[in-house]
Image (cartoon, rainbow, N blue to C red):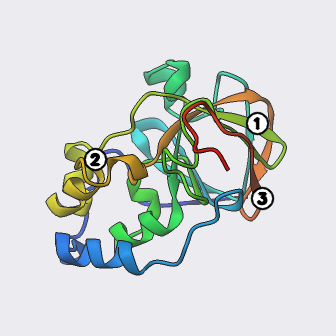
Amino acid sequence: MTRKHQIDSGSTGDPACHLDLEALEAGLTARAPTPRGAGTVTLLVRRGPGGAREVLQRAHLVRDGGLPGDRWEVKRRNRATSLTVMEDGVARLIANGQPLALFGDQIFVDLDLSRANLPAGSQVRMGSATLVVTPTPHDGCQKFRSRFGTAALRLVSGKVHRHLNLRGVYMRVVQDGDVGVGDVVTVLRRGEGAPQA
C-alpha cells in the first residue's frame, strides 16, 4: 500500500517553518534519549521519476541495489550510497511540521545513528534485511537549505555536531529482506571505532 505526496526533487520548504540555530540547538538538547541497541522503522519513502515521493508501508530491499524503483538505481548506482537513513527525532525537529518525505531520504528510524553508536562497518537488521553503514558522509546541500533553512544546514554540517550524523548515514543492503513501518531495527555488530562497553 502506498500513499503519494506532492513532493519531488524540485520542492522547497516553507520558510515560516525554518527554525533558527538557537531553537534547533535547544530542541536537540531537550529531545528524549534515542535507542542505541534496538529501535524501530518510522517511515519508508521511495523517490520515483523527478524525485516524486511515494510513502510506503512495506518495501523489499535488495543486496547492493537498495530500494527497487528508487531513482538511485538510475542516477547513482554507487553501492556505498544506495540508501540514506535518518534519525526520526532529528528529522522532526528540523522539519518543524513539514512532511518528512521532503528530506529525500528513504528510511527514517528511531535509533541513534551517531558515529559513537554506529561507526562505518556497523551492521543492522531492519525487518528481515541486513544493512551495513558505509563510510561515505551524508551531508546537507543547497536543496536541504532551501527546504529547512540556513540554520538547519549549519546544525547538520557544522563540526560541533558532525559526529552525531544529524543529516543521517548511508547504508547498503548486504542481505535481501522485507522491511515495514514499525519493524524493529537491531544493531547486530558495531564497526571499528565503536567505544568498548
Please report the residue visible at 64 percent of the width from the left and 24 percent of the height from the top: 65
Three-letter amino acid code of the residue under disc 3: Val
Residue 140 found in image quarter: top left
Three-letter amino acid code of the residue under disc 1: Thr
Disc 1 element: strand
Give above or below for 88 relative to 160. Answer: below
The mark that comes first in sequence, 2 or 3, is: 2
How far apart are the two marked residues, 2 and 1, measured between alpha carbons?
32 Å
Q: Which residue is mark 3?
A: 184
Q: Callout 2: 10 Å neighbours few (<14), some, many (20+)?
A: few
Give above or below for 111 relative to 8. Answer: below
The mark that comes first in sequence, 2 or 1, is: 2
The mark that comes first in sequence, 3 or 1, is: 1
Is residue 175 left or right of 69 when viewed as pictured?
right
Three-letter amino acid code of the residue under disc 2: Gly
How far apart are the two marked residues, 2 and 3, measured between alpha carbons?
32 Å
Disc 2 element: loop
CB contact under 8 Å: marks 2 and 1: no
Please report the residue visible at 58 percent of the width from the left and 44 percent of the height from the top: 195
How far apart are the two marked residues, 3 and 1, measured between alpha carbons?
12 Å
Q: Which residue is mark 2?
A: 10
